[in-house]
Structure formats: structure tokens, C-alpha cells
Image (cartoon, grey):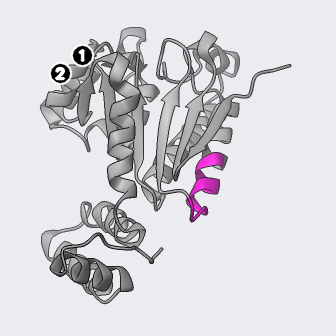
């Protein structure tokens, strides 16, 4: 039987979606992109899901687009549709009400590096490596540039895009591409620690906060503060905020109710 392209595992509110093309280093084929988008949209509508983890099977996290598939369909209309489809996956990650963590255990190149940057958070093994290496085959990684330039400084992003050189996990952390770097044998434990921390917070506050974060970051300062003030007011009058503040003052753990 053919192995599924995407695996899903649900554990205590954490949904792990694993890219499952290990022989192809989890390259983002058309079919895998379609399955990933459908899975993300399904998770987004699931109130029991609190955190999403994106992982990769085999030795790599994700090696980017499937170059063999692209060369077999060398047509501009095909390419336009493919990159629009990929961009929709990336924007869906930001639109999800749940925080998304990239679990990076191996290489993440080109659109795979873009996927890491598009996730809300990233935890990497110390052996992981990152590159936007399209320039090495005559292709500037334009779509990964969108995500990279929103994670790190311009000169740092452009250096990666212009040279195609790999950076290691610690360098990726210094540049702002990943949050945490740990030995590979404790990677799962560190991802769980981060996910559990988020799961322990108010789902309502997390949802409101994530939406606010991505909307305000593209605004001018005045408009951003207006939106933030409105979000803060809505959050403050919620049942979860009342519950949390009362619990804090009474020195006890809160019991969240909001969604």
C-alpha cells in the first residue's frame, strides 16, 4: 500500500502533522501541498486542537519544492498555480487560531526553510541546517524571501538568498529564524515543553493575540495601537480574563473556559 503523504497524531490538544515523503526529503509536491493545506484548515476548525506541530519524516525536515515534478511541468501557468498554492499554505499557518511550531530535526532548504519561517515558532535540533539555495541552480528563492525577510534582518536574509549557503541551527537562532536549539535526542521533549506551556494558557487569549500580532505587524504604528487597544478591550471583558485575574489575586490556578 502507498504510504500517506501526511501523517496526523493528536495528543492532549497538540496536533502533529508530519510530512511523509522521506525518500524525497519531504519535498513539497502538489499533492503534499494540497494535503497539508486541507489538514491545516481542518485543524483550524477543531476547538480541541490547541497547538500544531509541523514535522518531517526521515532524515530531512523539508527540502523545498519537488524539482522533478516542476521540470516535468515546465509551463508558466503551471508555475504560477504551484507558487500560489504554496503561498496559500504559508498564509494559512498564520491564519490558524492555534500557534504552529516547526520541529526541525534535519535540513530545511528553499521552500522548506520558508515553511520554518512561516510557522509561528520553531525548535531545531543542533544538527539541523538551513538554506535558501535556489540561487545555486539559477533560481532566486523569491517566495521564501517573503517569509525570511519577516523573520530576520534584511542583510541577514539577503545574505542567505544571494549566496545559497547553509547556516547551522545556532546561527539560525541568532538570526531569528528559530526560537530554540537543543540536542537532537531531546528535540521532542523541548517541542513538548513549549507546546505544553501554550496549552496551559487561555485558548481565547491565544487566538485573539495571534490574530492581532499578524494584523498589526503590517500596519503603521497608530493603526496598530488602535487595533491592539480594541483587541485588548475585547480580551479584558472576556470570561477567561476575569477568571485568570481572579485566580492570580487568589493565588490559585485558573480554569479557562473561553474558546
Give the answer, above or below, for where 145 lies relative to 232.
Answer: above
Please say if the residues under marks 1 and 2 sit with CB atoms less than 8 Å apart.
yes
Which of 177/126 is in front? 126
Label 1: few (<14), some (14–19) or many (≥20) C-alpha neighbours in 10 Å? some
Secondary structure of the residue carrying tag 2 is helix
> Is 50 inside the magenta-drawn segment?
no
Give the answer, above or below, for where 82 lies relative to 238.
Answer: above
Q: Residue at x 59, y 54 (%)?
A: 43
Point out the residue furthest to the bottom here.
237
Q: Residue at x 37, y 86 (%)?
A: 239
Residue 221's label in the rendered image is none
Which of 168/34 is in front? 168
Image-based side of 73 in relation to 142, left or right: right
Q: Residue at x 55, y 14 (%)?
A: 58
Which of 254/162 is in front? 254
Predominant SS along the magenta part: helix
Quarter of the image for residue 22 reads top right
Q: Position of residue 15 (x, y in %)?
A: 55, 46
The reply to whether residue 132 is in sight is no
Position of the N terminus, as image quadrant, is top right
Point out the residue furthest to the right here.
1
- Magenta range is 39-48
- Residue corresponding to mark 2: 171
Give the answer, above or below, for where 200 lies relative to 5.
Answer: below
The number of numbered discs placed on residues in the rendered structure image is 2
Q: Position of residue 197 (x, y in %)?
A: 32, 51
Q: Separation of disc 1 and disc 2 at Cα?
A: 6 Å
Image-based side of 243 in relation to 26, left or right: left
Q: Residue at x 33, y 41 (%)?
A: 193
Image-based side of 235 in relation to 36, left or right: left
- Residue corresponding to mark 1: 167
Secondary structure of the residue carrying tag 1 is strand
Amino acid at each position: 500500500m502507498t504510504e500517506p503523504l501526511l501523517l496526523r497524531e493528536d495528543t492532549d490538544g497538540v496536533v502533529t502533522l508530519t510530512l511523509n515523503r522521506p525518500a524525497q526529503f519531504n519535498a513539497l509536491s502538489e499533492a503534499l501541498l494540497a494535503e497539508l493545506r486541507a489538514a491545516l484548515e481542518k485543524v483550524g476548525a477543531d476547538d480541541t486542537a490547541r497547538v500544531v506541530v509541523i514535522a518531517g519524516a526521515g532524515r530531512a525536515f523539508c527540502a523545498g519544492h519537488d524539482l522533478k515534478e516542476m521540470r516535468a511541468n515546465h509551463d508558466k501557468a503551471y508555475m504560477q498555480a504551484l507558487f500560489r498554492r504554496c503561498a496559500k499554505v504559508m498564509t494559512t499557518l498564520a491564519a490558524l487560531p492555534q500557534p504552529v511550531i516547526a520541529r526541525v530535526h534535519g535540513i530545511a532548504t528553499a521552500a522548506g526553510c520558508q515553511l520554518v519561517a512561516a510557522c509561528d515558532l520553531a525548535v531545531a535540533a543542533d544538527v539541523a541546517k538551513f538554506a535558501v539555495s535556489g540561487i545555486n541552480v539559477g533560481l532566486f528563492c523569491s517566495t521564501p524571501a517573503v517569509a525570511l525577510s519577516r523573520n530576520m534582518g534584511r542583510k541577514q536574509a539577503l545574505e542567505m538568498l544571494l549566496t545559497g549557503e547553509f547556516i547551522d541551527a545556532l546561527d539560525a537562532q541568532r538570526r531569528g529564524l528559530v526560537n530554540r536549539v537543543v540536542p537532537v535526542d531531546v528535540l521532542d521533549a523541548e517541542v513538548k515543553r513549549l507546546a505544553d506551556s501554550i496549552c496551559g494558557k487561555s485558548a481565547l487569549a491565544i487566538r485573539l493575540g495571534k490574530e492581532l500580532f499578524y494584523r498589526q505587524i503590517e500596519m503603521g504604528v497608530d493603526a496598530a495601537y488602535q487595533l491592539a487597544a480594541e483587541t485588548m478591550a475585547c480580551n479584558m471583558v472576556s470570561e477567561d480574563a476575569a477568571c485568570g485575574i481572579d485566580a492570580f489575586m487568589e493565588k490559585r490556578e485558573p480554569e479557562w473556559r473561553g474558546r
